[in-house]
Image (spheres, rainbow, N blue to C red):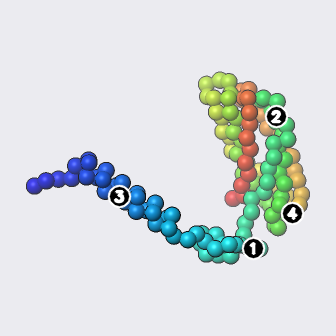
Amino acid sequence: MRGSTGDDRRTWGGALGLAVGLCLAACPGPGPGRDGGGRARGRTARKDPSVELRKFDGKRGVFRIHNQTRRTLRRVAIGLRGVGCEGPRATRTEVKVFDLRLRPGERQSFAFTFEHRCRRAHVAAATP
């Protein structure tokens, strides 16, 4: 009685991967103005607020949140990432959640401080 070998599994895995890749390439994508779920984008679509890094001196910085949505934001999650940092880790990631009341079109700035000096910083925002 012969069992399955590693080569047989690799062959089947490659064939399955090839079939999935061909199907994804041949199948049409969602139509214009539609997301993958088939729902039309419009007033019900949720956008995240934009965030920009205003100042960064290597350790301290300031970022600004701009509410471009059509609803009042009550909570915003911010991801801060320091790259090329001194200390035990070269990359530092922090996530901060702010409870606020930011109406549509308004902006608000926040300050942050990294534990160690970093060459660059990146910032991203999302609403839970």
The image's mark for residue 15 is 3
Quote the CA–CA distance across marks 2 and 4. 26 Å
Q: Are marks 4 and 3 in contact (CB under 8 Å)?
A: no
Q: Which of the marked residues, 2 or 4, is nearer the chain's N terminus?
A: 2
Q: Are marks 2 and 4 in contact (CB under 8 Å)?
A: no
Q: Which of the marked residues, 4 or 1, is nearer the chain's N terminus?
A: 1
Q: Which of the marked residues, 3 or 2, is nearer the chain's N terminus?
A: 3
- Can residue 96 be seen in this snapshot? no
Q: Residue at x 26, y 48 (%)?
A: 7
Instruction: Please tell me which residue lies in front, 86 or 34.
Output: 34
Q: Which of the marked residues, 1 or 3, is nearer the chain's N terminus?
A: 3
Quote the CA–CA distance across marks 1 and 3. 40 Å
Residue highlighted by disc 2? 56
| Residue 119 falls in image quadrant | top right
Disc 1 versus disc 2: nearer the observer: 1
Q: Residue at x 61, y 75 (%)?
A: 38
Residue highlighted by disc 1? 42
Split into 4 quadrants, where in the image is the C terminus?
bottom right
The image's mark for residue 99 is none
Q: In the visual, does 25 lie left or right of 108? A: left
| Residue 76 falls in image quadrant | bottom right
Residue highlighted by disc 4? 104
Going by the numbered disc 2, the residue's amino acid type is Phe
Quote the CA–CA distance across marks 4 and 1. 16 Å
Disc 2 versus disc 4: nearer the observer: 2
Q: Is residue 32 above or below residue 22?
A: below
Going by the numbered disc 4, the residue's amino acid type is Pro
**Residue 121 % position (x, y):** 74, 36
Quote the CA–CA distance across marks 4 and 3. 50 Å
